[in-house]
Image (cartoon, helix red, strand yellow):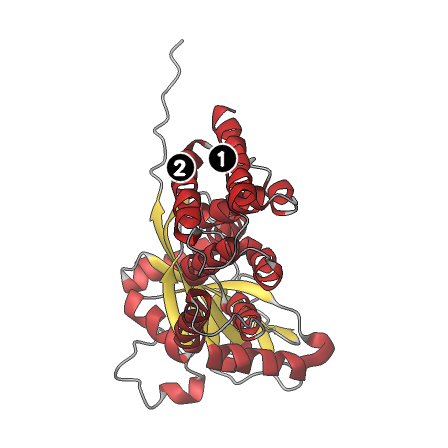
Amino acid sequence: MQAMEELENLAKKLDEIDDKFKTEDSSDPLWNIYVQKKDHVVEQMHELFPMVPDSFPLSRYLLSSSSGHQVVAVMWIQFKKDPFHLNILCYMLLNASSNFLTYHILHVLSNIMNQCDSNQLYQLKQTLLSYFPPHNTSRYAMKLKLLEKIEPQIDFSISDIVKDSYWWRDVESKFFNSLSGTSQFRLCGLRIIRNKKLFDNFNNYRDYLGENSQILFVYHGSSSKSLEGIAENGFLEPHMLDNVANKISILDQGYFGRGIYQGFAADYAIHYAESYKKSNEILLSMVLPGRSYIVKKGGEKYGQVCESGFDSHLSPENKEIVLFQSKQILPLFIIRFERIPNASIVEEHY
């Protein structure tokens, strides 16, 4: 609690500096002194944040009428590198009355940009395009710099996700909830994928499916190089494999159909990654199954195209789904995993 009390005191100190100087004009002779004093307080905040509990009341600070509280909240978001509060930061950027606060919001947005997914980057881009700071100011230069960074990230990029941040926790939860076996695993690395072409193709196909546009999360195991290739170019459709058969090892013609195979359980994909690719990485994707045909046992659909009137095949035990078009799949994250050794059982002595 001591760290929280000190943060509260620092917020009050920022408000006191505002009351004393009462200037937002960078041409004012007191401007540099004003900014230096406030920057010094912000530096003290950063030293406290590692000691602040995760129960930090962010909403109360963000909604406060105190500029000092708002600066504390923005600095906390930067410390956590968490894009979950991107909506609030964008709103604050468009409505902030303080140049000092605005500059730090822009700086935080720059720092958390590589933790954002495609939707969040689109939102950030639109916010910046709606933000009109005066020309020949540091805020205007920062806006241009951010827009310049966003464009290539939206087109295609892969970034490391900070452990225990929003997307790490989200993927970790999906990963653990999907496990079907008794073996235990943990995440030891996570990379987020952004690909405008695949993103647009996926959403266009989703619109095409209409009421059948249910989204599922699935896993695919392969080598690190292959997963990066999929992240950039999407999955190869069956008819494309004939042209690259010498470059890609194909297990078989497809027991449940000649298509693109995905597993519903992370450990199912891990089995393929470890057994056939000697890899410790799998891919988490969103898929649009549309209307799914449930394949009967006995090799009914071995090497066959999609059943007429359907968009995908489901394996008899519902462990795998077979998609037939690349635009049905949107790669989201590359997960690096490791096995947790099972604890040895100590026999009880009577």
Residue 300: tell me if it is visible: no
Left or right: 131 as drawn, with respect to 32: right
Q: Is residue 118 above or below residue 275?
A: below
Q: Which mark is residue 129?
A: none
Q: Compared with residue 76, is residue 323 higher up or lower down, i.e. above or below?
A: below
Q: Which residue is mark 2?
A: 44
Residue that extends furthest to the right in the rendered view of this protein: 211
Mark 2 vs mark 1: which is more N-terminal? 1
Image location (x, y in percent) of residue 235 = 43, 78
Looking at the rendered structure, the kind of residue marked 2 is: Gln
Category of crowding for the residue at label 1, using alpha-carbon neighbours closer than 10 angstroms: few (below 14), some (14–19), many (at least 20): many
Residue 199 appears left or right of 207: left
Q: Is residue 235 left or right of residue 20?
A: left
Residue contact at pointers 2 and 1, CB within 8 angstroms: yes
Where is residue 187 shown, x and y percent of the image? Answer: 39, 49
Could you say which disc has been placed on residue 10 in the image?
1
Position of residue 327 relative to residue 94, above or below, is: below
Q: CA distance from mark 2 to mark 1?
A: 8 Å
